[in-house]
Image (spheres, rainbow, N blue to C red):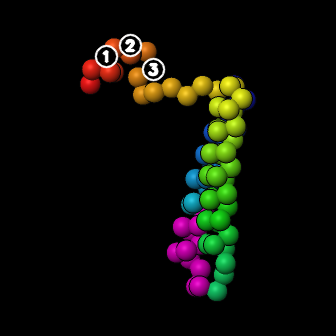
């Protein structure tokens, strides 16, 4: 359950950073580096979330599944 909470907070941070980057891009007059800083945070959070998920998969804490996890293998191989 705690992994889902971490993932949700990371997504919220990514969205907030993207929104602040848009705000600074529209409202700053070009003198500030706040847009760059906000978008750098977004990239860092995205890479961190991706690395976190890959580590959790590698340790077997979470298991990836397909779009249709309950479908039999014979149906997916025919298509």
**Image location (x, y in percent) of residue 29:** 58, 85
Q: Main secondary structure of the magenta part?
A: helix
Q: Earlier in the sequence, mark 3 or mark 1?
A: 3
- Residue denoted by label 2: 72
* SS at badge 1: helix
Task: Give above or below for 36 relative to 70.
Answer: below
- Numbered mark located on residue 75 in the image: 1
- Give the residue pinned by disc 3: 69
For the view shown, which residue lies furthest in the left direction? 79
Instruction: Tell me the mark number nearer the camera, choosing from 3 and 1.
Output: 1
Residue stretch in magenta: 20-30
Q: Nearer the viewer, residue 28 or 67?
A: 67
Task: Decide: is 71 above or below 41.
Answer: above
Q: Is residue 10 visible?
A: no
Q: Is residue 59 left or right of residue 43?
A: right
In the picture, the quarter occupied by the N terminus is top right
Residue occupying image coordinates x 33% and y 21%: 76
Give the Cα distance between marks 2 and 3. 8 Å
Q: CA distance from mark 3 to mark 1?
A: 12 Å
Rendering coords of residue 50 (x, y %): 62, 45
Q: Are marks 1 and 2 in contact (CB under 8 Å)?
A: yes
The residue at the point 64 percent across, 52 percent down is 47
């Amino acid at each position: 359950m705690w992994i889902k909470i971490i993932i949700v907070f990371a997504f919220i941070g990514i969205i907030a950073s993207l929104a602040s980057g848009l705000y600074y891009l529209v409202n700053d007059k070009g003198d500030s580096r706040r847009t760059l800083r906000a978008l750098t945070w977004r990239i860092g959070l995205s890479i961190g979330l991706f690395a976190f998920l890959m580590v959790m998969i590698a340790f077997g804490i979470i298991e990836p599944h397909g779009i249709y996890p309950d479908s039999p293998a014979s149906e997916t191989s025919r298509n």
